[in-house]
Image (cartoon, rainbow, N blue to C red):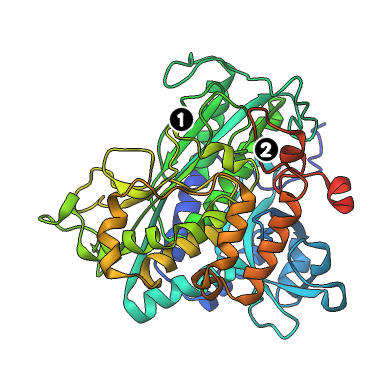
Amino acid sequence: MSEIKIKDFSVIPYEQLEELNLGAKHKMAQGASDSSLQEHYLRYLSDEKRIKAVTVCFSDLEGRFHMLDYDKKFLISSYDNLTFDGSSIRGFSQQCESDLRLAIDWGTFRWLPSDVFGPGKVMVFALILDREKGYYENDMRGQLKRYNEKLRTEQGLTTNLALEIEGFLFQGLNAEQSYDPAGSFKFVSEGGYFNTLPNAPLRIFIDRFAEAQRAMGFENEKDHPEVAPSQFELNYKYTDALIAADQIQTYKLLARLIASSMGYTASFLPKPMVGINGSGMHTNMSFSKNGKNIYYQENGPEKLSTFAWESIDRLLAHADGLCLVLNSSVNSYRRLDPHYEAPNQIRTSAVDRSAMVRIPIGNEKSARIEVRSVAPDANPYMSLYSIIRTALEAPINAAQSAHNRTRTDRILSDNIQDAIKKYQESAWLRTCLGENPHHKFAELKQLVADRCPKALGTRVKKSEVIFHHEVTNQQLWSQF
């Protein structure tokens, strides 16, 4: 007698997942209308009986990632009336105005590897709306989406972003929550750049991570252990700014899930241990118009156009205010240490990696600028939005710009207290982010800063780890 199959949820091979997700990514990148995407994916969900749930994702003001699963049948009938309690999310509504809405951004529809997420699930990102279904001002993903679409429709500009996201792999589950300064973190590998053996734990983790990343449509380029022991980096192709920001959140989620399945912790603390290289999120950026990279100019300085140099000048002019957005945790200021290739000098260079903005070697296709002073724990939506809008719109003093490019006397803040002060003094960041998000973000960062010493010293303190916004510890945060 044959065994009765009780469950029959979707399990899709990795090769097919990659094909499906690349198709979905292409639709979004080409600017398919929200209404057409909604119709397409609602029809798919109705027809595909083996999908049981839809994982809906959003991020708070600090960039902390939130997920909730909706039963597929419920979502199909109620997708236009999804609500949640915003007062339970740090940086969102006050208790007296707590109801917020989730609006599915259907272009983000992705099929999930069943061995990582379980069978029968797909994932979408959401926009946060207020009670009247208007954009919620503290939702930085919404701000980035609107600005990205405005550039495309009003100026014909396409954003091109490629991120280099570094992280660490530590022994044991929940290594951050149980951090003990006396014992420090435990590496899974002592090998460094390029020399970790193929069957070492770090290499096995990277291989599994790369497989899942490829299946999710990242368009992988290369992966390798990084300079520090137990450090990793997986590179992938440039894409549109909003897709790039979503991929940052997905990248870190995949890393954490795969590490956890192996009994490890994937950490994106910028500097979990003093004396070794920290982790960054180097942000490579260019713009295209009519399919042409407008950052490139064959006879320009470093083969960059005047348009590209003006972008650099704006970023350098407003680097002090941007510093908190790009380095939003206490721990991130340990990374801005010039002894470890840290980008703490507010200048540009084609060769010196201590410069905030580097100009990589490029041709007509790959010409770009690299903003090196971004930490991997920054809110990806806030950081990419701020970088892009600053590069295109921020006011500059033309007479001072040429001098700013090469001067060595301007240094980024070396602690979060000073960074908060410069951020609050920046009229441009207030204009860029909006009055309320600007104020609320500074308020949240001050709460963390007040619980940590201003002088960081040479020992990673417990407070900068357990109060870190990406370390999930609900009981602790409810007391914080």
Q: Position of residue 169 (x, y in %)?
A: 62, 28
The one of 32 and 349 positioned closer to us in this rendering: 349
* Residue type marked 1: Tyr
Residue 169, compared with residue 321, is above or below; it is: above
Residue 269, compared with residue 152, is above or below; it is: above
Residue 148, picture quadrant: bottom left
Q: Secondary structure at mark 1?
A: helix
Q: Nearer the viewer, mark 1 or mark 2?
A: 1
The one of 215 and 279 positioned closer to us in this rendering: 279
Q: Residue furthest bottom?
A: 132
Give the CA distance from mark 1 to mark 2: 29 Å
Q: Residue furthest front?
A: 409
Q: Which mark is residue 340?
A: 1
Give the left or right position of residue 98, taking residue 452 as reference: right
Q: Which residue is found at the position 66% from the left and 75% from the top? A: 436
Give the left or right position of residue 93, taking residue 315 as reference: right
The one of 242 and 295 positioned closer to us in this rendering: 295
Q: Determine which residue is flagged by label 2.
A: 257
Q: Position of residue 171 (x, y in %)?
A: 69, 22
The quarter in which the N terminus is drawn is top right
Q: Position of residue 179 (x, y in %)?
A: 77, 29
* Residue type marked 2: Leu
The one of 73 and 291 positioned closer to us in this rendering: 291
Residue 137, compared with residue 215, is above or below; it is: below
Q: Which mark is residue 314?
A: none
Q: Secondary structure at mark 2?
A: helix
Q: Which residue is found at the position 25% from the left and 66% from the top? A: 307
Q: Which residue is found at the position 70% from the left and 44% from the top? A: 119
